[in-house]
Amino acid sequence: QSVLTQPPSVSAAPGQSVTISCSGTNSNIGNNYVSWYQQFPGTAPKLLIYDNYKRPSEIPDRFSGSKSGTSATLGISGLQTGDEADYFCAAWDRTLNPRCVFGGGTRLTVL
Amino acid sequence: EAQLVESGGGLVTPGGSLRLSCVGSGFTFKSYSMNWVRQAPGKGLEWVSSISGSSTYIYYGDSVKGRFTTSRDDAVNSLYLQMDSLRADDTATYYCASNNDFWTEGYMDVWGKGTTVTVSS
Protein backbone atom coordinates (compact mmCIF):
# COMPACT_ATOMS: atom_id res chain seq x y z
CA GLN A 1 0.00 0.00 0.00
CA SER A 2 1.64 3.20 -1.19
CA VAL A 3 1.58 6.37 0.92
CA LEU A 4 0.53 8.45 -2.08
CA THR A 5 -2.58 7.31 -3.96
CA GLN A 6 -2.75 7.21 -7.74
CA PRO A 7 -5.24 5.57 -10.07
CA PRO A 8 -3.81 2.28 -11.37
CA SER A 9 -4.57 3.17 -14.97
CA VAL A 10 -5.85 5.87 -17.28
CA SER A 11 -6.45 5.86 -21.01
CA ALA A 12 -7.26 8.26 -23.79
CA ALA A 13 -7.03 8.54 -27.55
CA PRO A 14 -4.14 10.12 -29.42
CA GLY A 15 -4.42 13.90 -29.48
CA GLN A 16 -6.60 14.02 -26.40
CA SER A 17 -5.64 15.12 -22.90
CA VAL A 18 -5.46 13.15 -19.68
CA THR A 19 -4.85 13.89 -16.02
CA ILE A 20 -3.34 11.66 -13.36
CA SER A 21 -4.10 12.40 -9.74
CA CYS A 22 -1.89 11.88 -6.71
CA SER A 23 -3.39 12.13 -3.26
CA GLY A 24 -1.47 12.45 -0.02
CA THR A 25 -1.60 14.13 3.37
CA ASN A 26 -0.35 17.25 5.10
CA SER A 27 2.86 15.50 6.10
CA ASN A 28 3.87 14.91 2.50
CA ILE A 29 2.14 16.67 -0.41
CA GLY A 30 0.47 19.27 1.78
CA ASN A 31 3.77 20.75 2.93
CA ASN A 32 6.36 19.59 0.42
CA TYR A 33 7.07 19.73 -3.29
CA VAL A 34 5.76 17.06 -5.61
CA SER A 35 7.75 15.50 -8.42
CA TRP A 36 6.60 13.20 -11.22
CA TYR A 37 8.52 10.46 -13.01
CA GLN A 38 7.91 8.68 -16.29
CA GLN A 39 9.01 5.08 -16.74
CA PHE A 40 8.90 2.95 -19.85
CA PRO A 41 8.96 -0.85 -19.41
CA GLY A 42 12.43 -2.15 -18.69
CA THR A 43 13.99 1.27 -18.30
CA ALA A 44 14.86 3.60 -15.44
CA PRO A 45 12.48 6.32 -14.28
CA LYS A 46 12.94 9.80 -15.73
CA LEU A 47 12.17 13.10 -14.06
CA LEU A 48 9.15 14.72 -15.68
CA ILE A 49 7.98 17.44 -13.28
CA TYR A 50 9.62 18.90 -10.18
CA ASP A 51 8.65 21.46 -7.53
CA ASN A 52 4.97 20.80 -8.29
CA TYR A 53 4.88 22.27 -11.80
CA LYS A 54 8.37 22.90 -13.19
CA ARG A 55 9.69 20.97 -16.19
CA PRO A 56 13.27 20.01 -16.98
CA SER A 57 14.33 21.75 -20.18
CA GLU A 58 14.02 18.62 -22.29
CA ILE A 59 10.44 17.86 -21.28
CA PRO A 60 7.85 19.23 -23.75
CA ASP A 61 5.21 21.63 -22.48
CA ARG A 62 2.54 19.03 -23.23
CA PHE A 63 3.35 17.83 -19.72
CA SER A 64 2.17 19.96 -16.82
CA GLY A 65 1.91 19.67 -13.07
CA SER A 66 -0.17 21.31 -10.38
CA LYS A 67 -0.83 20.99 -6.68
CA SER A 68 -3.69 21.96 -4.44
CA GLY A 69 -3.74 21.16 -0.76
CA THR A 70 -2.84 17.52 -0.30
CA SER A 71 -3.32 16.51 -3.93
CA ALA A 72 -1.28 16.90 -7.08
CA THR A 73 -2.11 16.40 -10.72
CA LEU A 74 -0.08 15.54 -13.79
CA GLY A 75 -1.58 16.67 -17.07
CA ILE A 76 -0.62 15.44 -20.51
CA SER A 77 -2.06 17.11 -23.59
CA GLY A 78 -1.82 16.18 -27.23
CA LEU A 79 -1.35 12.52 -26.32
CA GLN A 80 1.03 10.49 -28.45
CA THR A 81 1.47 6.74 -28.57
CA GLY A 82 4.98 7.33 -27.30
CA ASP A 83 3.53 8.64 -24.04
CA GLU A 84 2.40 5.15 -23.08
CA ALA A 85 4.30 4.53 -19.85
CA ASP A 86 4.00 4.32 -16.08
CA TYR A 87 3.84 7.59 -14.18
CA PHE A 88 4.79 7.98 -10.52
CA CYS A 89 4.34 10.90 -8.17
CA ALA A 90 6.67 11.46 -5.23
CA ALA A 91 7.07 13.78 -2.27
CA TRP A 92 9.06 13.97 0.90
CA ASP A 93 7.22 13.07 4.06
CA ARG A 94 8.25 14.58 7.35
CA THR A 95 6.70 12.61 10.15
CA LEU A 96 9.05 11.10 12.71
CA ASN A 97 11.89 10.56 10.29
CA PRO A 98 12.12 12.15 6.83
CA ARG A 99 11.39 9.76 4.01
CA CYS A 100 10.57 9.97 0.35
CA VAL A 101 7.21 8.48 -0.57
CA PHE A 102 6.00 7.41 -3.99
CA GLY A 103 2.59 6.82 -5.45
CA GLY A 104 1.77 3.32 -6.63
CA GLY A 105 2.06 4.40 -10.24
CA THR A 106 -0.41 4.93 -13.07
CA ARG A 107 -0.22 3.07 -16.36
CA LEU A 108 -1.16 5.36 -19.25
CA THR A 109 -2.61 3.69 -22.32
CA VAL A 110 -2.99 5.70 -25.50
CA LEU A 111 -5.73 3.92 -27.39
CA GLU B 1 26.26 14.66 -19.36
CA ALA B 2 25.51 13.48 -15.84
CA GLN B 3 25.53 9.71 -15.54
CA LEU B 4 25.12 7.11 -12.81
CA VAL B 5 26.12 3.46 -13.17
CA GLU B 6 25.14 0.81 -10.63
CA SER B 7 26.83 -2.52 -10.11
CA GLY B 8 26.98 -5.35 -7.63
CA GLY B 9 23.62 -6.99 -8.12
CA GLY B 10 23.18 -10.72 -8.37
CA LEU B 11 21.66 -13.84 -6.84
CA VAL B 12 21.99 -14.27 -3.08
CA THR B 13 20.44 -16.72 -0.64
CA PRO B 14 18.09 -15.54 2.11
CA GLY B 15 20.02 -14.21 5.06
CA GLY B 16 22.98 -13.34 2.88
CA SER B 17 24.66 -10.03 2.11
CA LEU B 18 25.38 -7.97 -0.96
CA ARG B 19 27.01 -4.61 -1.60
CA LEU B 20 25.79 -2.38 -4.38
CA SER B 21 27.86 0.43 -5.86
CA CYS B 22 26.96 3.44 -7.93
CA VAL B 23 29.52 5.59 -9.70
CA GLY B 24 28.68 9.10 -10.85
CA SER B 25 30.25 11.09 -13.66
CA GLY B 26 29.63 14.32 -15.55
CA PHE B 27 28.66 16.30 -12.45
CA THR B 28 30.13 17.38 -9.12
CA PHE B 29 29.18 14.26 -7.19
CA LYS B 30 30.11 15.57 -3.75
CA SER B 31 27.70 18.49 -4.06
CA TYR B 32 24.56 16.41 -4.26
CA SER B 33 22.62 14.11 -2.02
CA MET B 34 22.01 10.61 -3.33
CA ASN B 35 19.27 8.03 -3.12
CA TRP B 36 18.62 4.34 -3.52
CA VAL B 37 15.22 3.45 -4.95
CA ARG B 38 14.09 -0.09 -5.72
CA GLN B 39 11.41 -1.70 -7.81
CA ALA B 40 10.22 -5.25 -7.26
CA PRO B 41 9.20 -7.16 -10.40
CA GLY B 42 5.94 -5.77 -11.73
CA LYS B 43 5.61 -3.33 -8.82
CA GLY B 44 6.01 0.37 -8.23
CA LEU B 45 8.94 2.43 -7.01
CA GLU B 46 9.99 2.17 -3.37
CA TRP B 47 12.40 4.61 -1.77
CA VAL B 48 15.13 2.79 0.13
CA SER B 49 17.57 5.36 1.47
CA SER B 50 18.99 8.84 1.06
CA ILE B 51 22.32 10.32 2.04
CA SER B 52 23.12 14.01 2.08
CA GLY B 53 26.29 15.62 0.93
CA SER B 54 29.14 15.05 3.37
CA SER B 55 27.09 12.11 4.73
CA THR B 56 25.63 14.46 7.33
CA TYR B 57 22.19 12.89 7.15
CA ILE B 58 21.29 9.32 6.21
CA TYR B 59 17.70 8.12 6.13
CA TYR B 60 16.21 4.69 5.53
CA GLY B 61 12.84 3.26 4.66
CA ASP B 62 11.14 1.21 7.37
CA SER B 63 11.45 -2.01 5.38
CA VAL B 64 15.27 -1.86 5.30
CA LYS B 65 16.14 -0.01 8.49
CA GLY B 66 18.63 -1.95 10.58
CA ARG B 67 19.55 -4.24 7.67
CA PHE B 68 20.85 -1.88 4.98
CA THR B 69 23.61 0.72 5.28
CA THR B 70 24.16 3.58 2.86
CA SER B 71 27.50 5.30 2.48
CA ARG B 72 29.37 7.40 -0.02
CA ASP B 73 32.99 8.09 -0.98
CA ASP B 74 33.18 11.43 -2.71
CA ALA B 75 36.86 10.90 -3.52
CA VAL B 76 35.82 8.28 -6.08
CA ASN B 77 32.34 9.64 -6.85
CA SER B 78 30.69 6.56 -5.43
CA LEU B 79 27.57 5.62 -3.51
CA TYR B 80 27.18 2.29 -1.75
CA LEU B 81 24.40 0.17 -0.32
CA GLN B 82 25.44 -2.61 2.04
CA MET B 83 22.56 -5.05 2.27
CA ASP B 84 22.56 -7.61 5.07
CA SER B 85 20.02 -10.16 6.29
CA LEU B 86 18.49 -10.21 2.85
CA ARG B 87 14.96 -11.53 2.40
CA ALA B 88 12.97 -12.70 -0.58
CA ASP B 89 11.01 -9.47 -0.59
CA ASP B 90 14.22 -7.52 -1.16
CA THR B 91 14.26 -8.93 -4.69
CA ALA B 92 14.15 -5.91 -6.97
CA THR B 93 15.97 -3.69 -9.39
CA TYR B 94 17.91 -1.14 -7.37
CA TYR B 95 18.39 2.31 -8.83
CA CYS B 96 20.66 5.05 -7.60
CA ALA B 97 19.49 8.57 -8.23
CA SER B 98 20.96 11.96 -7.48
CA ASN B 99 19.01 14.75 -5.85
CA ASN B 100 18.99 18.29 -7.08
CA ASP B 101 20.78 19.68 -4.03
CA PHE B 102 23.17 19.00 -1.17
CA TRP B 103 20.55 18.02 1.36
CA THR B 104 18.31 15.00 1.12
CA GLU B 105 14.92 16.48 0.45
CA GLY B 106 14.76 17.24 -3.23
CA TYR B 107 13.77 15.70 -6.49
CA MET B 108 15.68 12.93 -8.22
CA ASP B 109 16.96 14.36 -11.47
CA VAL B 110 19.51 11.77 -12.61
CA TRP B 111 18.93 8.02 -12.46
CA GLY B 112 21.13 5.04 -13.18
CA LYS B 113 19.93 2.12 -15.26
CA GLY B 114 19.66 -0.10 -12.20
CA THR B 115 21.14 -3.36 -10.95
CA THR B 116 19.06 -6.44 -10.20
CA VAL B 117 19.11 -8.23 -6.87
CA THR B 118 17.48 -11.64 -6.54
CA VAL B 119 17.13 -13.23 -3.13
CA SER B 120 16.31 -16.91 -3.45
CA SER B 121 17.43 -20.28 -2.21
Image: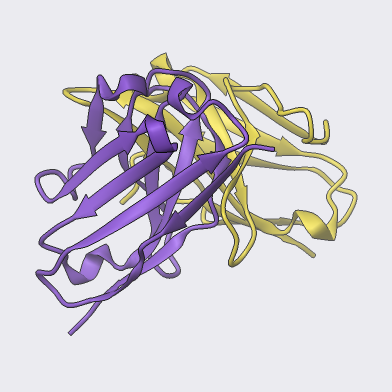
Chain colours: A yellow, B purple
The outermost residue toward the bottom is: B121
Q: In which quarter of the image is residue B119?
A: bottom left
Q: Would you place residue A57 above or below residue B47 in this image?
A: above
* Residue B71 in view (yes/no): yes
Q: Would you place residue B45 above or below residue A97 in this image?
A: below
Residue nearest the observer in this picture, A51 or A25: A51
Q: In which quarter of the image is residue A110?
A: bottom right
Q: In this view, does A98 lie to the left or right of B102?
A: left
Q: Would you place residue B97 above or below residue B53 in this image?
A: below
Residue found at x 12% / y 51%: B67
Task: Locate residue A14, reporting x and y percent.
Answer: 87, 56
* Residue A4 in view (yes/no): no
Q: Quadrant of the C terminus of chain A?
A: bottom right
Residue found at x 28% / y 25%: B55
Q: In this view, does A72 lie to the left or right of A110?
A: left
Residue nearest the observer in this picture, B22 or A1: B22
Q: How many marks can you see?
A: 0
Residue found at x 21% / y 71%: B88
Task: Locate residue B22, reporting x and y percent.
Answer: 42, 48
The outermost residue toward the top is: A31
Q: Would you place residue B3 above or below residue B93 in this image?
A: above
Q: In this view, does B119 lie to the left or right of A72?
A: left
Residue found at x 88% / y 44%: A78
Residue nearest the observer in this picture, B54 or A2: B54
The outermost residue toward the front is: B75
Task: Locate residue A79, reporting x and y percent.
Answer: 83, 49
Q: Is residue B102 left or right of residue B19?
A: right
Residue nearest the observer in this picture, B49 or A18: B49
Q: Quadrant of residue B102?
A: top left
Task: Locate residue A15, reporting x and y percent.
Answer: 90, 50
